[in-house]
Amino acid sequence: MHTRTGKDTKLSIVVPCFNEEKTLRKCIEKVLEIADETLSLEIIIVDDGSSDQSLIIARELENKYQEIVVLSHKKNQGKGAALRTGIQRVTGDFVAVQDADLEYNPMEFKKLLVPLINDKADVVFGSRFLSAGYHRVLYFWHYQGNRFLTFLSNMFTDLNLTDMETCYKVFKREIIQNIQIKENRFGFEPEIVAKVAHMRLRIFEIGISFYARTYEEGKKIGVKDGVRALYCIFRYNAHFAPIPIQFLIYIFIGSFCAVVNLFVFLGLFKTGFVITIASPAAFIIAAIVNYFLCILLLFKHKVRWNTKTEATLFLLIVVFVGACDLGLTKMFLLFGMYAGVSKLLASGGCLLLNFLGRRFLVFPEPSSGPWKPQENK
């Protein structure tokens, strides 16, 4: 399988399980078959509050095979939560995920491990769409949904994956144990892709076969999980996304704030406030809205005023861009434009200045670089 000899590679496989009594035993037996003279296994089954016989079957397997450890949740928490529990307990050189159904063939792990064992990769994904192997033909829109989510994820991560949602992801143990997993359900997939992308790891893809299940056969992922995946792509990537993508997001934020700016300005202007008061007041209110939207959607999540420098920079940018906004508004009014049009054009002109100031001065993100273990301890 690789250039090293002896039983010197240990693969830990985390198996999240929820109501899989029909397939769990056969799945685990298939996983056990991949062990050989060069590869030993550690199988962590995490029963996620199953209401059927899954936990009983898992315990029977644990008693029968020394490679198996069974963990359990009293209540169902979701695939991400089960993986979080299992990953904390693994001890192997590499860590893989295996769903408890029979959609994936565990024998594929052998080829996924090759780049890792030979130290060519840090993470290897098994792509269902890159393979010439067999695939069960099923849902068209489910397939298109997967492709769309992968495309969107790639836009935000600047990767060129073909299958972001794949279950088969194999990691170096020290890497996956240094990633804080927050998602409890199927949002694990876009979250983990985002986080390995930010770490600038060596990521490989290898084609795998796939035998999809129908919903009647127990498939659990649905439309709600697709919506959550969209949210996760945005949440875990926006603050690290390429600058053009961040600017597109900021256009939406800035456009909304420009509307706030406009309506506040018109309200003040029509009630008798002079332009030198109405324009700065409207701009300041819009800037406050802009700041909180940037925190919520784009830059530092849940940031707080924690340094005098950050507060000072933000206020200086507000004053500078506010002065530009006032100057442009006056200029357009002198050209004979309506007050609303003048203000709208001025706000649009300040959009890029706002974005650059916030991105590089107020909310600077540390540059991503090659992952180093000592930086993540």
Image (cartoon, rainbow, N blue to C red):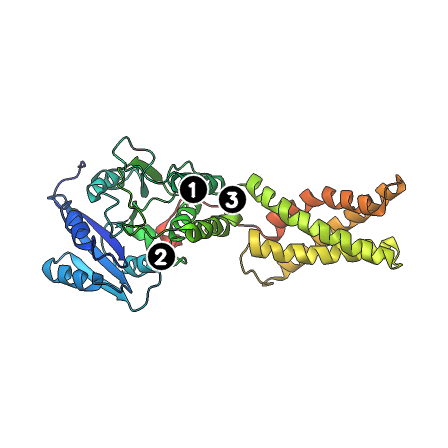
Earlier residue among tags 1 and 2: 2
Mark 3, residues whose alpha carbon is within 10 Å: few (<14), some, or many (≥20)?
many
Is the C-beta separation of discs 3 and 2 under 8 Å?
Answer: no
Dot 1 falls on a residue whose secondary structure is: helix
Q: Are marks 3 and 1 in contact (CB under 8 Å)?
A: no
Q: What residue lies at 55% left-to-right and 55% top-to-bottom?
A: 300
**Quarter containing the N terminus:** top left
* Occupied quadrant, residue 136: top left
Q: CA distance from mark 1 to mark 2?
A: 20 Å
Give the labeled residue for mark 2.
80
Would residue 299 be visible to someone looking at this image?
A: no
Q: In the rendered structure, which amino acid carries the disc numbered 3?
A: Ala
What x and y, as percent, mark residue 163? 37, 40
Residue position for label 1:
145
In the figure, is residue 231 to the left or right of 216? right
* SS state under label 2: helix
Q: Position of residue 321 (x, y in %)?
A: 74, 49
Q: Which residue is mark 3?
A: 241
Residue placed most toward the observer, 201 or 264:
264
Count the marks: how many?
A: 3
Task: Examine the rendered structure and indicate whether residue 59 appears above or below residue 154.
Answer: below
Q: Nearer the viewer, residue 219 or 282?
A: 219
Amino acid at circle 2: Gly
- In the rendered structure, are the residues bearing label 1 and label 2 in contact, judged by CB atoms less than 8 Å apart? no
Quarter placement of the C terminus: bottom left
Q: Residue furthest front?
A: 216
Mark 1: amino acid = Gly
Q: Residue at x 25, y 40 (%)?
A: 112
Residue 138, position in %: x, y? 32, 39
Gap in angstroms between the C-alphas marked 3 and 2:
23 Å
